[in-house]
Image: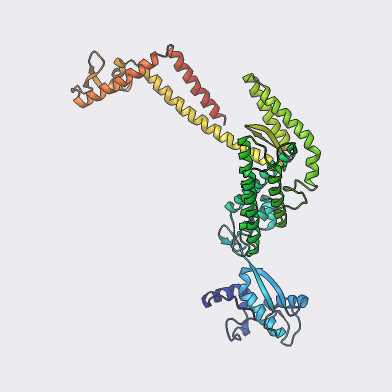
Amino acid sequence: GAPSSAPSSTAQQAQLAEGEGALGVGLGAFAGEKRCPQDFALWKCSKRGEPAWPSPWGPGRPGWHIECSVMASDLLGSNLDIHGGGSDLKFPHHDNELAQSEGFHDTHQWCNYFLHAGRLDIKGLKMSKSLKNFITIRQALREHTPRQIRLIFLLQAWDKPMNYTDQAVADAKAKEQHFKNFFGAVKALLRTDWPAAPQSWRDQEKRAQARLLELQALVHRSLLDNFDTPSAMQALVEMVTLMNKYAEACRAEQVPVRVLLVKKAAVYITKMLRIFGVVTAGDEIGFPLGAGPADDLEKAVSPYLDAMVAFRDSVRGATKDPQMKAAVLKECDALRDDTLANLGVRVEDASNGPSIWKMDDPAVLRREIEEKRRKAAEAALKRDQEKLGKKQKELVKWTGALVPPAELFKSGANRTKYSEWDEDGLPTKTAQGEDMTKNALKACRKEQAQQARVHDELLAKGDFEAFIADLRAEVDALQATLATR
């Protein structure tokens, strides 16, 4: 028969106990009937309240291993080609299925191949109700989209334990965004009058095409190698990076992108993601936008959005007056981040070219914009806090600089430290009437020289009182601003 998948004898006992669970204990009068701990029951005596069927041995029910063998044999006969299941069922469940099925059918190979899927771990621990880390698909869908969940599974090997962690979710979302941005950029290129531009291939296009073919071959090899979807997905991600770098190089050299090359990559990536179940509609390029065909929607709105985005670019570039420009740019940002985002249109501004638009999920756009605004607010808060600290230090410095050097050791906290001074204002005796030591006098001379420098620097500013008043007003304004956040 098929080779046993049983682990070592030490692990066997624990796995037997876990595999049998409550069915392997509490047999009462029959507890001593097992000749070997590895024995399992084909038919069990029913307990009170459990289902029961008549049998030569009295009312009872099937053992849990034989349920699977009976159902599979009833539907598929005496030989199975492929039998699936979780890796935790290798032993004892599948071994027991083999033993009873091969005995019943009098065959040496009831099943040709077993495919054992890796178990799902939640943050490093096996998912189980006892650990209270059990997550249903319905619960997961409340936090993530179906596409993101599919990507999480694709990015981990099907036959190895899968760890469902915040990092795995973040990785899936990052790759989803990587693909979405690429598809949107390709569609933006296809909306231009690209056939009018040169289409002959230079060395850059030939190198990109050669690498693209290598990556396609890598996808194929990965899937032939035990359905290695993580490696296949990484090759698709690398295709996107390859095409992005190619397009960036074209922009830097101010030469037209060969649109058919990047379209070829986008079509292939979409095809593979459709095979993987990540793209669920029939669009040639990219993820679907809703229930209907996304291409139809984009084609319908394309002329209007082209006109609106072009008008927005013209307005942004035409305003020269600084005050007016700030107001115009604010309204342009509101059009991008509020009006168009709520309609499911992503507008991306470029520093060295026209803005481009992409269709997207309004809810996704709103979340991204809220996150961007939150980060901007945090950055502004940090910036103002640092500015306040800097201005407060300046205020302390220049307020202290108001004191003439000759009065430095006669005023403020220094007044109580000394009892006599010379004509330059340097202390000669301590508060206790003792002569100043040589080292103490040297330190005072150094401090007075420093005071003379900052005092002269303050006087050089002209109306130094107004300067300090302005600085104090800046500190007060920053404190008031921070108090409202």
Residue at x 42% of width, y 11% of height: 462
Is 400 or 372 nearer to us in this picture?
372
* 254, above or below 73, in the image: above
* 48, above or below 106, in the image: above
Residue furthest top as drawn: 462
Q: How many numbered marks have been drawn onto this rendered protein structure?
A: 0
Looking at the image, residue 214 sits to the left or right of residue 483; the answer is right
The image quadrant that residue 90 belongs to is bottom right
Q: Position of residue 175 (x, y in %)?
A: 63, 49
Is 141 or 149 nearer to us in this picture?
149
The C terminus lies in quadrant? top right
Q: Is residue 315 visible?
A: yes
Type of colouring: rainbow
Q: Is residue 411 visible?
A: no
Q: Position of residue 163 (x, y in %)?
A: 59, 58
* 120, above or below 328, in the image: below
Residue at x 49% of width, y 23% of height: 475
The image quadrant that residue 60 belongs to is bottom right
The N terminus lies in quadrant? bottom right
Is 52 or 20 nearer to us in this picture?
20
Q: Position of residue 145 (x, y in %)?
A: 69, 50
Q: Position of residue 237 (x, y in %)?
A: 63, 50
Residue at x 43% of width, y 22% of height: 395
